[in-house]
Image (cartoon, helix red, strand yellow):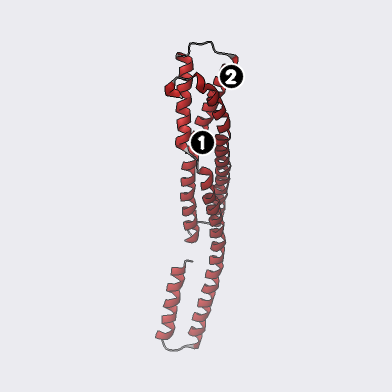
Amino acid sequence: MSLFIFFTLFVFLFARMYKSKPNASKLSYNLFFILFSLVLFTSCGGKHRAEVAAVEKLEVSLEGNLKNLEIDDALFSTRIEYIESVLRYFSNDYSTEVSLELGNNLDKLKSLKKIYAKRLNEHAHNLKEQGELGTQLTALKTDISNGAMRKEAFKSYFNTEKIDIEVLLNSSVAVKKALYEVEPEYSRIIETLTPLLPGDLR
């Protein structure tokens, strides 16, 4: 029973009590009905409050994930483009014999490029998932607040959202860690290769 319905019912019965002539039995009946409705409303409202609180807890977790999504996409996209240019130079224009050390560094550079590309794709997916989950939680909270969803259905949707958020949190942390933890290796390789590169790639 929503707050609006209860309030309307209360006003209606209250008006009836004072519109008609005083009648002890009717007065007692109306008072009993109002008290019963009040207890029923309080009970339902309490249950809704608990469920809404549970959804809001998920919203807090989802909002806390924003810090994990703070990644410099432009930086890593530039890394990919630069690596491609460097690899293309050594593949097409580098005329000196490739040493074992140089070959190993180029192989590592290829691996770094794959890591950057893979993690950036995952990051884009996580950003989209963050927005969609936020929308779904808002809708879930609205439905349960309005009494438009049965308790069993709520539990099912809630558990699904909870699992999805946990997956998103873990993925977001992993993506950010993977991108930034390879930066020292990237810097080391580029520093090693720089003396071998033409001026426009240095």
Name the residue carrying label 1. Answer: 122
- First in sequence, mark 1 or 2: give its number: 2
Q: Nearer the viewer, residue 97 or 87?
A: 97
Instruction: Let me know if residue 182 appears in the view.
Output: no
Looking at the image, which residue is at 53% across and 77% down? 35
- Looking at the image, is 139 positioned above or below residue 77? below
User: Where is residue 33 shown, x and y percent of the image?
Assistant: 51, 77
User: Where is residue 115 shown, x and y percent of the image?
Assistant: 54, 30
- In this image, 20 relative to 154: left or right? left
User: Where is residue 48 shown, x and y percent of the image?
Assistant: 54, 62
- Looking at the image, is 53 positioned above or below residue 84? below
| Pair 1/2: label in front | 2
Looking at the image, which residue is at 53% across and 22% down? 193
Asked which quadrant contains residue 93, the reply is top left
Looking at the image, which residue is at 48% across and 15% down? 91
| Circle 2 Cα neighbour tier, 10 Å, few/some/many (<14 / 14–19 / ≥20) | few
Total numbered badges shown on the rendered structure: 2
Q: Nearer the viewer, residue 63 or 95?
A: 95
- In this image, 36 relative to 7: left or right? right
Disc 1 residue type?
A: Glu
- Looking at the image, is 11 positioned above or below residue 113? below
Instruction: Calculate the distance from the C-alpha at mark 1 to the C-alpha at mark 2.
Output: 27 Å
User: Which SS class for mark 1?
Assistant: helix
User: Which SS class for mark 2?
Assistant: helix
Name the residue carrying label 2. Answer: 104
Disc 2 residue type?
A: Asn
Q: Nearer the viewer, residue 12 or 119?
A: 119
